[in-house]
Image (tube, rainbow, N blue to C red):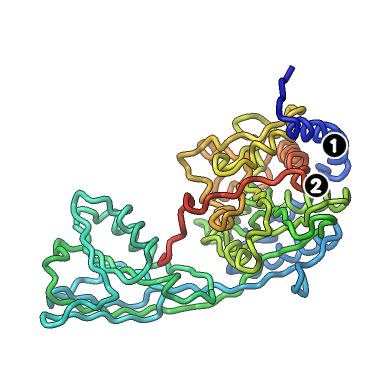
Amino acid sequence: MLNIKNKKLWGFLVVATLSFTSTAQGTSTTISLSQVTKDVTYLASDELKGRSNFSDDIHQAADYITKRFEEVGLSPVAGNNGFYQKYSVKTITPKTIALSLNNKVIATDNIAFASTAKNFIWTMNNKEKKPSNVEIHTVGKDDDMRAALRQLNAQGGQHIVLLHPAHQDMFKRYQHYFTQGITKLNSVKPSSQQGGAIVIALTDISAERIKSLSVKASSTISTTELTNVVAVLPGNTKKDEVVLYSAHYDHLGTKENKEGNDVVYNGADDDASGTAAIINLAQHFAKQGGNSRTLMFAAFSAEEIGGFGSRYFSQQLDAKTITAMINIEMIGKPSKFGAGTVWMTGMERSDLGAQLNAALADTTMKIYQDPYPEQDLFYRSDNATLARLGVPAHSFSSTQLDKDEHYHQVSDDLASLNLPSMHKVIKAIAIATQPLVDGKITPSRIDTNLVKGKGLIY
């Protein structure tokens, strides 16, 4: 028999045990396999052509999510006319660059650049010092190129990187990446806080030997409007405290096969499964009624291209009001712990996981710790945006990334899913988070000093 000396904890466990039976029974009628199947089937259908962010098809997915939110009785966020939360992103694509070092022109094949500005010019000659806002760096033969660029990207500002030719293969990868253009959220923040430029030159010249330089670069900028779908179920006694359930509904679109036909990246697991989950969790809690805290349900766009949907969302409210974020990412297949089981990223960063497991103590269910720490999954979904603001924000998944042959492939379709396992995961999340909904538990905040920031340039 468990010896519990903490009377407060004992009281919580008693209440949790008494409420668990009704909650578990409730999920049997409010979260049905048939409805889960219907939702994920449509979202992952060929009709939506992979829900690419820059296509018309993603709007059909947004319309469907909106319709379902309306059906279950949710309301728009205060101040919004409807469920759509529109924002814009800009794609900055390199157009031209001319670079000379010590009066020697560097071939464009040996230059790569990324910039958040449309144009920039930097000059320096023998009589002038380099521009005060431009830093020149040397990455030598034995230096870690990726680590150096990562640091400069996190720092932001204006940089010239003189890269030893020994890094040519890695340079080509960055060059190709930058050529595709970088996408940034249109923001009210000053550009000095969110951007900059970085020019990489493949050369054996070091920074100390630079006597003169000239850089002139231009890019094209295109702007696209995107949409989150956000709805609320107002709370009763703790209306100002929010429990956020989220998933991203965008995916990769289509590709052309050898015959010239479009092949669809259906994104059934990634992340039609998570989107179907939040819809059915919304239905469950709306039917159940009596939620003490306000419940918010957000379907984010642009996760696949940089998490811009969740970043915009985070700027529209006070992060301190969010008690916890339950971000659901790829739950369509059994985890390594068995069918119907789920694991959570960043369990060590807050006590949310421990509290959820306390709610499941008298069941056979359990929230497992992320079994793939080497994959850095805490930073690979929308939860990271809110975690950077201190929210106990975690992703819940069942994917086996070390074995999943369908990840970001056209084979990630409905046939690849285990729908009964997915159904069980959704019910487990509903049961585990019931104390959050009831206002009985409040997880610790995440230490923002221990969360890595986003790159400011690319």
Horizontal arrangement in the rendering, residue 291 relative to residue 424 (left or right): right
Label 2 to label 1: alpha-carbon separation: 10 Å
Residue 419 visible in the displayed image: no
- Give the vertical position of 1 relative to 184 (above or below): above
Closer to us: 360 or 336: 360
Q: Secondary structure at mark 1?
A: helix
Q: Is residue 434 left or right of residue 167?
A: right
**What is the quadrant of residue 421 in the picture?**
top right
For the point 82% across and 44% down, the residue is: 31
Residue extending furthest toward the top: 1
**Type of amino acid under label 1:** Ser
Q: Which residue is mark 1?
A: 19
The answer, for residue 14, to whether it is visible in the render is yes
> Residue at the location (59% across, 43% down)?
350
x then y, percent, for residue 373:
49, 39
Q: Are marks 2 and 1 in contact (CB under 8 Å)?
A: yes
Seen at 24% across and 56% down, the residue is 168
Task: Describe the element under mark 2 as helix, strand or loop.
Answer: helix
**Along the viewing direction, whichever of 172 and 14 lies nearer the viewer:** 14
Residue under label 2: 438
Location of residue 261 (image quadrant): bottom right
Q: Nearer the viewer, residue 107 or 255?
A: 107
Q: Quadrant of the C terminus?
A: bottom left
Whether residue 458 sits left or right of residue 60 in the image: it is left
Disc assigned to residue 234: none
Q: Is residue 55 above or below residue 275?
A: below
Q: Position of residue 93 (x, y in %)?
A: 42, 73
Residue 260 lies, in percent from the top left, at 53, 61
Q: Amino acid at mark 2?
A: Asp
Side of 329 where 189 appears, left or right: left
